[in-house]
Amino acid sequence: MSANGTDNSTSKKPPSPSPLRFSKFFQSNMRILVTGGAGFIGSHLVDKLMENEKNEVIVVDNYFTGTKDNLKKWIGHPRFELIRHDVTEPLLIEVDQIYHLACPASPIFYKYNPVKTIKTNVIGTLNMLGLAKRVGARILLTSTSEVYGDPLEHPQTESYWGNVNPIGVRSCYDEGKRVAETLMFDYHRQHGIEIRIARIFNTYGPRMNIDDGRVVSNFIAQALRNEPLTVQLPGTQTRSFCYVSDMVRCSNSCSKSNYFTYECHLILIFFVLINQG
Ligand SMILES: NC(=O)c1ccc[n+]([C@@H]2O[C@H](COP(=O)([O-])OP(=O)(O)OC[C@H]3O[C@@H](n4cnc5c(N)ncnc54)[C@H](O)[C@@H]3O)[C@@H](O)[C@H]2O)c1
């Protein structure tokens, strides 16, 4: 992600990669850490990464919203490791790449314990950046469209800085992710860490939590239960949707600079599509 009107060039040299990178083992394998890998997007990312036989994948997750069930096909696989760990605690391992996803994404869950949510975003991201710095790993952060807050511009471009309430009930997530992005860029400028930030919009697909309270799961759950679909007034809200496999394809290209755009859809059109089956 490019910076928004600021100079992000770094005069510092990147940190030296871990000496393990030059070992016989690392020449054939890429060791990849996925935080939050037991969650919805994380587990699909793990599936994608495991397709490459040269990858070794380590998942850390505290199972707040994720579940081992999402990863059951990999448990016991020689190239896969699952660690119960909370990213607010430091983690000492050797990896080449970090995909840092750990954080509840649904308002129902991130508002449940807002202090924990902001700790996960701030302390968790600091811990992962500390790890990236120590071992010379590249790191990708999954940020969110919520960094734009209640945007005054539509659609939002990366040069837009957002309109965010710092003291609202969603701030633990919105401001937490904004600080996480700041930390990413500060580590890049100060320590030469290689960073990627993906600002994700509404993602949907298999394994999403049916009770996560967002529009896609709400509509589908109501349709499956033969209940009337609830449209929040005024019904003219827009959302940008992305299917999870497209999201993973983008995030998986951790080594490339990636941009893709989302189209905005009226919630009412989505309502009509679901309603008509
Ligand atoms: N799904 C979306 O539409 C969407 C939109 C914008 C951003 N994102 C971002 O994408 C990432 C993944 O979202 P998701 O939809 O898969 O959510 P999810 O809730 O399904 O997955 C999050 C995972 O992180 C784990 N986790 C939470 N706190 C943790 C902690 N302190 N330590 C270790 N693990 C922890 C959870 O147990 C879960 O497995 C999140 O960073 C989220 O902010 C998602």
Image (cartoon, rainbow, N blue to C red):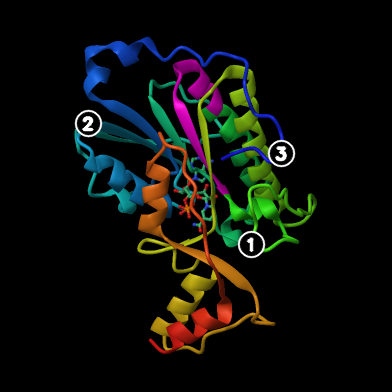
Give the residue type that dot 1 points to: Pro
Using the numbered discs, state the Cα–Cα distance from disc 2 to disc 3 in whole angstroms.
39 Å
At 44% across and 24% down in the image, what residue appears?
137
Q: Position of residue 66 (x, y in %)?
A: 43, 51
Using the numbered discs, state the Cα–Cα distance from disc 3 to disc 1 in whole angstroms.
18 Å
Q: Decide if residue 160 is on the left or right side of residue 100.
A: right
Q: Give the numbered dot on residue 155.
A: 1
Q: Decide if residue 221 is on the left or right side of residue 89.
A: left
How packed mark 2 is, by other alpha carbons closer than 10 Å (few <14, some 14-19, many 20 or more), is some
Q: Give the numbered dot on residue 5.
A: 3
Give the residue type that dot 3 points to: Gly
Q: Which residues are magenta?
A: 129-143
For the N terminus, the quadrant is top right
Q: What residue is pinned by disc 2?
A: 54
Q: Nearer the viewer, mark 1 or mark 2?
A: 1
Q: Is residue 266 above or below residue 66?
A: below
How packed mark 3 is, by other alpha carbons closer than 10 Å (few <14, some 14-19, many 20 or more), is few
For the C terminus, the quadrant is bottom left
Identify the element where label 1 is drawn: loop
Q: Is residue 134 magenta?
A: yes
At 41% across and 37% down in the image, what residue appears?
254
Depth check: give the residue in front, 237 or 80: 237
Q: Is residue 231 magenta?
A: no
